[in-house]
Image: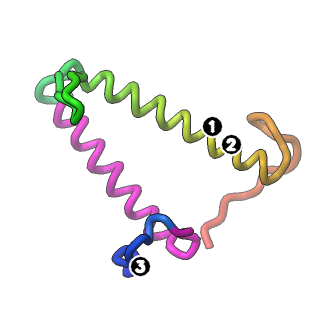
């Protein structure tokens, strides 16, 4: 975690900081889930917010945007994988590589 304080850390490869990245991601997920839950429990999914550009958006729209953005990046990751291993499709042939945390 000490490398997080280094200028430009987020723009370099984090291969040596997997634990730090997972911790940051888990913290961000927790903050997001708490914020959404708070709104859902108090005012509902159609609560209107003013975006930084001045436009009005609902929590419903923000959630749909997050799903779309996540799906887009999942597709990007798949394109990178396909470029690296040369296999295409959702379930490439062959034995799956086991996931292991070193």
Q: Nearer the viewer, residue 82 or 6?
A: 6
Q: Position of residue 62 (x, y in %)?
A: 32, 28
Q: Which residue is mark 3?
A: 3
Question: Hey, which residue is sitting farthest left in the picture?
Answer: 42
Q: Badge 2 local density, few (<14 within 10 Å), some, or many (20+)? A: some
Looking at the picture, how far across and down is residue 13, in whole percent? Answer: 56, 68
Q: Which mark is residue 33?
A: none
Looking at marks 1 and 3 on the same chain, the residue that comes earlier in the sequence is marked by 3
Question: Which of the two residues, 40 or 72, is positioned nearer the viewer here?
Answer: 72
**Residue 21 in magenta?**
yes
Give the secondary structure at mark 3.
helix
Residue at (25%, 36%) from the top-left corner? 36
Q: Is residue 48 above or below residue 87?
A: above
Relative image position of residue 98 (x, y in whole percent): 72, 58
Residue 93 found in image quarter: top right
Does the CB distance between marks 2 and 1 fall below 8 Å?
yes
Q: Position of residue 52 (x, y in %)?
A: 22, 36
Q: Residues within 10 Å of mark 1 (few under 14, many from 20)?
A: few
Location of the N terminus (image quadrant): bottom left
Tell me the residue that label 2 is attached to: 78
Q: Residue at x 70, y 42 (%)?
A: 79
- Residue at horizontal 17%, vertical 28%? 50
Side of 68 where 36 appears, left or right: left
Q: Secondary structure at mark 2?
A: helix
The majority secondary structure of the magenta stretch comes to: helix
Q: Give how far apart the Cα atoms at labels 2 and 1 are.
A: 5 Å
Per the rendered image, the range of residues in magenta is 12-39
**Disc 1 to disc 3, C-alpha distance:** 29 Å
Q: Which mark is residue 75?
A: 1
- Report the side of 10 relative to 57 (left or right): right
């Amino acid at each position: 975690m000490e490398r997080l304080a280094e200028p430009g850390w987020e723009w370099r490869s984090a291969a040596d900081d997997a634990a730090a990245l997972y911790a940051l991601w888990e913290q961000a997920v927790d903050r997001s889930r708490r914020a959404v839950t708070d709104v859902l429990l108090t005012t509902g999914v159609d609560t209107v917010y003013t975006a930084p550009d001045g436009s009005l958006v609902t929590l419903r729209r923000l959630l749909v945007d997050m799903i779309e953005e996540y799906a887009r990046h999942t597709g990007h990751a798949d394109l990178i994988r396909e470029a690296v291993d040369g296999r295409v499709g959702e379930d490439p042939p062959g034995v799956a590589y086991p996931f292991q945390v070193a």
